Image (cartoon, helix red, strand yellow):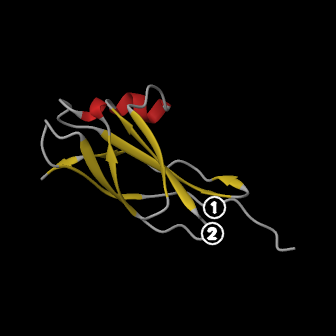
Amino acid sequence: APVVVKPGKATVKKAVKKKKSAKKIKVTLKKVAGATKYQVAVYKTKKNAKKNKKALVKKTVTKLTATIKSKKLKGKKTVYVRARAWNTAGYGAWSGVKKSKKK
């Protein structure tokens, strides 16, 4: 049987929140070799994101472009996003923190 290796570090290419009142954010990730899913986490502050504390939303997605919806995102002007790749061997390293842009 082939040996499955943990995926590498993920990268968040883009995170766009259309306006402060929006309840969703569009996240674009870079493809990670060997990954089958990605876990995306959205935070209120950069400090929380770096320490991986108090995520507003954590969602597992299969595509590289995903829209994360949550009522908790409403009223937040700027949010911070991180992601990590997953396969049957486990999770890869978290990406760096990406600040959301307003469209």
Q: Residues within 10 Å of mark 1 (few under 14, many from 20)?
A: many
The residue where tag 1 is placed is 7
Residue 70's x, y, as percent? Answer: 32, 37
Residue 23 vs residue 6: left or right?
left
Residue 21 vs residue 66: left or right?
left
Q: CA distance from mark 1 to mark 2?
A: 6 Å
Q: Who's the residue at 42% across and 64% down the image? A: 64
Residue 22's x, y, as percent? Answer: 17, 41
Does 34 sit above or below residue 97? below
Q: Who's the residue at 49% across and 32% down the image? A: 52
Instruction: Please report whichever mark, 1 or 2, sits nearer to the chain's N-terminal start.
Output: 1
Q: Who's the residue at 69% across and 59% down the image? A: 6
Q: Who's the residue at 63% across and 69% down the image? A: 34
SS at badge 2 = loop
Residue flagged by tag 1: what amino acid is it?
Pro
Does 48 sit above or below residue 14? above
The residue where tag 2 is placed is 34
**Whether label 1 touches label 2, CB < 8 Å:** yes
Residue flagged by tag 2: what amino acid is it?
Gly
Q: Is residue 29 visible?
A: no
The number of callouts visible is 2
Residue 73 position by quadrant: top left
Residue 14 position by quadrant: bottom left
Residue 48 position by quadrant: top left
Q: Which residue is the extreme one toward the right?
A: 1
